[in-house]
Image (cartoon, rainbow, N blue to C red):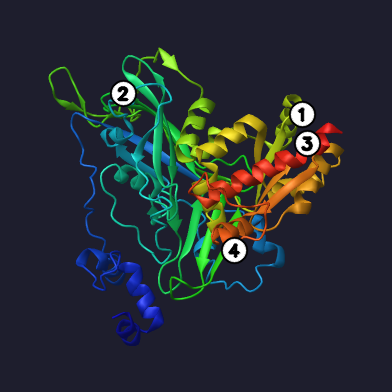
Amino acid sequence: MWELALKSLGSEGLFLFSSLDTNNDLYLSPEEFKPIAEKLTGVTPVSDFEEDVPDPNGETLSIVAKFQPLVMETMTKSKDGFLGISHVALSGLRNWTAPVSPKSVMLARQFKAFLPPKNKLDLGDPWWIIPSELNIFTGYLSNNRFYPPPPKGKEIIIHRLLSMFHPRPFVKTRFAPQGSVACIQAISTYYYTIAFRIHAEFQLNEPPDFPFWFSPGQFTGYIVLSKDSSHVREFKLFVPNKRSLNVDMEWLYGASEGSNMEVDIGYLPQMELESTGPSVPSMIYDENGNVIDSRDPSGEPIQFVFEEITWQQEISWEEAAQKLEVAMYPFKKVSYLPFTEAFERAKAEKKLVHSILLWGALDDQSCSGRTLRETVLESSPILALLNESFISSWSLVKELEELQTNRENEFYSKLADLHLEKYNFPVEMIICLPNGTVIHHINANYFLDITSMKPEDVESSIFSFSSNFDDPSTATYLQFLKEGLQRAKAYLQN
C-alpha cells in the first residue's frame, strides 16, 4: 500500500500526506485534512475548544507576552556562517521575531486545570496536569508533523497560553519526559500558589518546507488562584534563561521519517507570559443588580481593591521547582551540583565526582541523552550508589569552554580542561577525583553500542554484564561506577 502511495504522490507528496495522517491509516479524515483546508481557503472556523464566552458572574484575566528571538550567534552552526544550511530551512526561525498575540484576555475559570486533585493537597506533592504518554517502551512521536492535534481537556489552557507565542505549539513533546506537572507551593484559607513545569515545543515551518522543531528546555512558572478557580491573583510562565543554552532545535532535510536531521542548540533571552494584574469581574453590577459602566466618569477603568493574602503554609520556589524536576526526571533524586561546587563538595566529603558532560542541555533530546536518563540514571541501584559514593554534576560543553579560558581561577580552568580533554560528542560520562584527575570515562554512544550487544559478544571485562540485573544498561553503568571506585583506591591511598 505504501509503495502504491509513493508511486501516486511522489516522495514529497507522501511526506505531506503522512504528516497529516496522524493515525497512519492511509486515509485523511475531515479532522486530519482541516489544517490544509484552512490554509487553502484562508478561513479559520470557530474553534471547537472551550470558548471565551463572557460569564456574567465570572472574571477575566489579561495576560501579556514578552519575547526576544533566539540569538542566532549562539547556535553552533553560526561558527562557520551556517555553511551548507539552506536559508529556507531556517526561515521559520529567522522570521519568528515577536509573539503572535502580544496580549490576550482569558476567563479565570479556564485556569481550573491548574487546581490540585483531592489527593494532592500537601505542599510539594507533584501531580500531572498533562500526563506523559511516553516511556522507553513506547518510543517517541513522529518528527514528520506540521500541525498540532486538537487539544483536549486540560491541554486546552496550556495550548491557548503557548499559542500567544506561536500558532503551532505541541503541548506534548516528541520525546519523554513529556507533559505538564505541578505542585502546591503555598496555601491560605482561600488561595493556592501552584508551581508548574511544562514540556512543550513548537513547529516553526509549514509545507512545502520540511519540519523545524523548536524545543525550549522547559516552561516553568506559578499561578496564585482561588480554591474555586473563580479568581486569579497572579500568573507567570517563562523559559528559564540563566544558563548559556536553553533551546534544542532539530530540522529535517528530506521527505521521509528517516531523512537526515540536523540538530543544534541556542540561547533564547526571553519567552514569558505574565498577568497584568488580578482577574476582574466581566460585568459590574450596582446594588440593584443593574450593569454599570466599567469606567469612571473620567474614562479611567474602575480600580478594584483586593484583600491581602495571608499564607498559612508555604515552601520556597527553589524547593517547589526541585520537586517538579524530580517528577520529570526521577534520576534527579540524586542532587546534581554546579560544576565547580561539585568538586568543592567532593573534597569536603572525600568522595569521587560523577560528571556528565553534554553538548546540549540536560533536557537533551538526542537518542543517547534520552536513553541514559530513561534506562540508566533512574534505576534504583544506580541512584543508591551515586548517593553513597559520588558527588554528581552535569555541565554543557560551552560552559566548560568558557571556564577553561577564565584565568582568574586557575584551578577551575584546569578542571574544565581535564574534562574537555576526555569529551566526545554527544555525551561523556566521567569519574574523577576531587582534584580533577579523570580516572574513568565512557561515551554515551559507546555505552549504547555495548549494551545493545549480546553478553557473549562483549570483549571488555571492564563493561561486563551482571547476572544480578535483567537490564544490561543498568548492569553496565553500575559496573562503570564500581570500576571507577576501584581505580580510585590507588589515588586515594597515595
Find residue 242 and report its horizontal and vertical position in percent: 62, 39
List the residue tagged with mark 4: 457
Residue 18 visible? The answer is yes
- Quadrant in the rendering for residue 167: bottom left
Work out which quarter of the rendered image holds the C terminus and state it.
Answer: top right
Q: Secondary structure at mark 4?
A: helix
Residue 237 visible? The answer is no
Task: Give the CA distance from mark 2 to mark 4.
Answer: 61 Å
- Foreground residue among 274 and 465: 465
Task: Give the CA distance from mark 1 to mark 4.
Answer: 39 Å
Q: Looking at numbered disc 1 in the image, what kind of residue is underneath it?
A: Lys
- Quadrant in the rendering for residue 75: bottom right
List the residue tagged with mark 1: 347
Q: Looking at numbered disc 3 in the image, what kind of residue is underneath it?
A: Lys
Q: Write the residue at 31% across / 30% down.
A: 115
- Nearest to N terminus: mark 1 or mark 2: 2
Find residue 456 and report its horizontal and vertical position in percent: 58, 61
Asked if 305 appears above or below 71 in the picture, the reply is: above
Residue neighbourhood size for the residue with mark 3, other residues' Cα within 10 Å, grouped as few (<14), some (14–19), many (≥20): few
Find residue 114 and report its horizontal and vertical position in percent: 33, 33
- Quadrant in the rendering for residue 37: bottom left
List the residue tagged with mark 3: 489
Task: Give the CA distance from mark 1 to mark 2.
Answer: 48 Å
Q: Which mark is residue 226?
A: 2
Asked if 308 appears above or below 465 in the picture, the reply is: above
